[in-house]
Amino acid sequence: ITLIVILAVLFIGDQDAKLYAQHMIADKIGSSGLGTTPSVRIEGWPFLTQIAAHDVKAIDISASNVTSGKVPFSLTARATGVHLNSSFNGATIDQINGSATVTYASIAGLIPIPGLTIGPDPADGPDAVQLSTALGGATGTIEDTSANVITLKLGSLTGLAGLLSGLTGSSPAQSYPIDIPKLPAGLVVRSVAVTSKGVVATASATNTTLTQ
């Protein structure tokens, strides 16, 4: 019974320490430019032995509806090889991989046309999308145009130009940039993919810091 009580106390203390560390990491990431406080989960048990060694195996980061840019997105990331500094107030990271997902509904919101829907168009290519309304549509592609910027570029128009001109008095732009605001831990967008759930920007970084 005594052994069970000791183990229970150690377990509770370990979990409390992990919860506190997760909260502190989330606050640091949120204040480093992401614009929102993410959810953070530290992998592994016991946690206190990782702290004593200044090495954390892995940290999972997630956030939904990040709205620090014009278009909201959701974020997931996993950092491995996290080395705490001597003051326990910062860390270096061997590798971090993540993805930022932008829904088609959010992208459609960039173009002021009621009832506009956007979806993947695999028949036209892996990066192609189809824009549709009741009165016409357009083809387009999603491209990684610069660091942390992806762009919707319109191709052929079928009724969409006339519809937008009638609603706003102007023709549709040929491109619509989508800024991915600063990502945590130095993550940089490396590639973009058109998926059934939305546009997914894959990001990574090596030898970076937690608050970079």
Image (cartoon, rainbow, N blue to C red):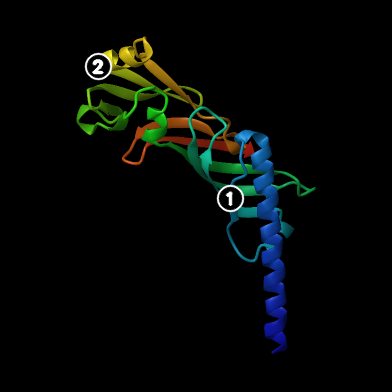
Label 1: which secondary element: strand
At a point 69% along the width and 90% down the height, the residue shown is: 1
**Apparent side of residue 182 relative to residue 48 in the rendered image (left or right):** left
Quadrant of residue 177 within the rendered picture? top left
**Apparent side of residue 145 relative to residue 63 in the rendered image (left or right):** left
Tell me where residue 111 appears, x and y as whole percent.
38, 22
Amino acid type shown at disc 1: Ser
Seen in the picture, residue 119 relative to 85 is either above or below; the reply is above
Q: Which residue is mark 2?
A: 157
Tell me where residue 127 appears, x and y as whole percent.
31, 28
Quadrant of residue 139 within the rendered picture? top left
At a point 41% along the width and 20% down the height, the residue shown is: 176
Q: Which residue is mark 1?
A: 39
Number of residues whose C-alpha sits closer than 10 Å to that of mark 2, classed few (under 14), some (14–19) or many (20 or more)? some
Seen in the picture, residue 30 relative to 159 is either above or below; the reply is below
**Apparent side of residue 111 relative to residue 159 in the rendered image (left or right):** right
Q: Nearer the viewer, residue 82 or 26?
A: 26
